[in-house]
Structure formats: C-alpha cells, structure tokens
Amino acid sequence: MKGKQIIKTGAVFGMLAVGIGAFGAHGLKDILDETGRAETFETAVKYHFYHSLAIFLIGILALVKPTWHKLSTAAMLMVVGIIIFSGSLYFLSLTGITWLGAITPLGGVAFIAGWILIFLAASNKND
C-alpha cells in the first residue's frame, strides 16, 4: 500500500469505529448490559479507534518518508490486528461465545508487530 491508500484505509476504519461504537452505545445497549459484555465491547471499540488513527498517521508518514518501506507492512498489521482483536471481541460481546477470546491475542500480536515495524522504519540509518 502507498501513503494515500493507507490514509484512506485509516479513514474507513476510523469511520467504522465511530459507527460501531455509537451503535453499541445506543442500539446494542440492552443486549450488552444483559450479557454483561459492555466493557468488552468498549475495549474492542477503543483498540479499533486507536489503531485506525495509527493507520492514518502511518499513511501520512509514508507520504513524508517514502523510503521507509516497512510502513506499508506496519499498516497491514494494524488492519489485521483490528479485524482479529476488535472483531473477536465484538463477536464475543454479542454472541457470548467465549472460545473466541482465544484468538484475540493474535490480533494483539499483530498490533505489537506493527508498532515494532514503525520503530524499525524510523531506525533506518540510510534516511
């Protein structure tokens, strides 16, 4: 992915985070309160939104520093992290299927790997 594509991806994921968060707070409030999973849903929304912002900022950084090639992979890892981490928590919150919690850490690993790649890109001695 190039800088503009990464920015667009961050914008789409940010839009989804706001929409899902609002829907959870209003449209799903009764279900989440009944299942006791409102806090889990809120955690999913937080990580979704934080990493949407990270993707957006990675896109801007990719435009400014086009030689930092690891940024594209970092953005993709953030996307994978949102889908696995937040997605599994959203699903768990709504269905109560607890075994899904077992895959949530894989999304966390993707987030961590993305942050590591940003660090490595910024550590490039040739730039």
Image: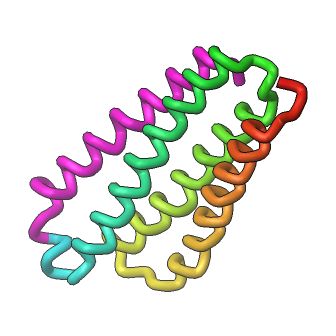
User: On screen, 92 above or below 121?
Assistant: below
What secondary structure prevails in the magenta region? Answer: helix
| Residue at image location 15% in from the left, 57% down from the top | 25
| Residue at image location 27% in from the left, 41% down from the top | 18
| Residue at image location 66% in from the left, 65% down from the top | 109
Image coordinates of residue 3 in percent, x first then y, are: 63, 19
Q: Which portion, as a residue range, is magenta?
A: 1-30
Image coordinates of residue 8 in percent, x first then y, are: 50, 21
Image coordinates of residue 1 in percent, x first then y, are: 71, 24
Q: Name which quarter of the figure residue 47 lies in.
A: bottom left
Nearer to us in this view, 63 or 45 = 63
Relative side of 43 to 68, left or right: left
Type of colouring: rainbow
Nearer to us in this view, 99 or 4 = 4
User: On screen, 22 above or below 98?
Assistant: above
Location of the C terminus (image quadrant): top right
Q: Name which quarter of the figure residue 55 lies in.
A: top right
User: On screen, 73 above or below 100?
Assistant: above
